[in-house]
Image (spheres, rainbow, N blue to C red):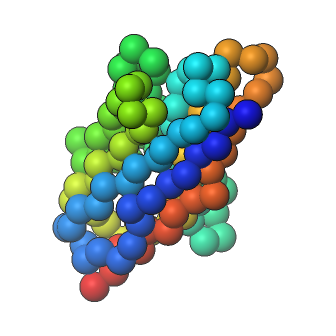
Amino acid sequence: QVQLVESGGGLVQPGGSLRLTCAASGDIYTIRTMYWHRQAPGKQRELVAGISTGGSATYADSVKGRFTISRDNYKNTVVLQMNSLKPEDTAKYYCNADSIRRGVEYWGQGTRVTVSS
């Protein structure tokens, strides 16, 4: 089993920055790609960014150039640096990891981000 715990959410003004951290524990050797997803009120969950074990990153078009995902395989953390935040970035952000075990994935409990003046 793998446990994922997110931190770093909060209230920020438009144009501001936040740094989200996801800490993994447990059977971390089974983790492959890690992701950040978000779900805004009344909307479906959407993929924000992902990063492979080798550090290759992908982003949703809506966050390209503003968000950066990074990974520290020694500290077992993945970080989402969010800059130039917009009100439409308001959502609950979830850390997700897929596993070397087929069909297995893990989710954190989420951390809330609110962008408002």
> Could you say which is closer to the camera, residue 20 or residue 49?
20
> Which corner quadrant of the image does residue 105 belong to?
top right
In this view, 94 is above or below 57? below
Residue 73, image x and y in percent?
40, 25
Q: Which residue corresponds to the image point at 38% horizontal and 54% vertical from the top-left? A: 20
Q: Nearer the viewer, residue 11 or 99?
A: 99
Give the residue at x 31% y 55%.
Answer: 19
The residue shown at (63%, 34%) is 26
Residue 91 image position (x, y, % from top left): 50, 65
Left or right of residue 10, residue 68 in this image: left
Q: How many marks?
A: 0
For residue 85, what is the image quadrant?
bottom left
Q: Is residue 107 left or right of residue 78?
A: right
Residue 26 appears in the figure: yes
Residue 102 percent across, percent down from the top left: 78, 17
Q: Is residue 59 above or below residue 73?
A: below
The quadrant of the rendering that contains the C terminus is bottom left
Residue situated in front as seen by the camera: 98 or 47: 98
> In the image as oriented, which residue stretches furthest toward the bottom?
117
Q: Is residue 46 visible?
A: no
The picture places residue 33, in percent across and down from the top left corner, at: 53, 24
On-image quarter of the N terminus: top right
